[in-house]
Image: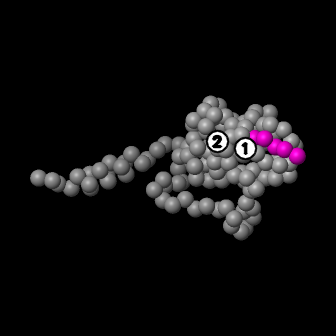
Amino acid sequence: MALTIGGVLLVAATLVGCGGGGSNNSNPMAPTPTTTGGGGGGVAADVTITINGMDGAQSFSPSPGSVKVGQTVAWRNSDSLAHTATADGGAFNTGTIAPGATSSPIMMSAAGSFAYHCSFHPSMVGSLTVTQ
Ligand SMILES: [Cu+2]
């Protein structure tokens, strides 16, 4: 007899969905509101870099990213964990970006090639090239 196996699976999935951690305000099943381009001080960055998750040199894309001096960069966290984009030399730091969130735009005021990482997961590395 085929009983309601679908219902059992649904309950199991709901129980698994309770991941521990600090910021637990986002339901992965719910549509994530995007604030890009909205009003109320939400200024869109010139360049947005996606945070893929913990994947070494593939954690951020594109990497190296490329912007011009005076342009702004934001990092969008598409992973289910919180991350940061923190320049190795301290040139910039997004602070903690919650899952699904986008950092505030950061203006790049100096040319150079900036290596950065996630402060929570040092294996996550990327680079940003700022040109004149
Ligand atoms: Cu991280």
What residue does disc 2 label?
60
Task: Indicate the position of residue 84 as horizontal and vertical percent values.
Answer: 67, 42
**Contact? badges 2 and 1 (CB < 8 Å):** yes
Q: How is the model colour-coded?
A: one colour
Labelled disc at residue 1? none
Mark 1, secondary structure of its residue: strand
Q: Foreground residue, 122 or 109?
A: 109
Label 1 packing within 10 angstroms: few (<14), some (14-19), many (20+): some
**Residue 31 drawn in magenta:** no
What residue does disc 1 label?
65
Q: Residue at x 29, y 50 (%)?
A: 9
Magenta stretch, main secondary structure class = strand
Separation (CA) of disc 2 from disc 1: 9 Å
**For disc 1, does the CB lie below 8 Å from ligand 1?**
no
**Residue 131 drawn in magenta:** yes
Label 2 or label 1, whichever lies nearer to me, is: 1
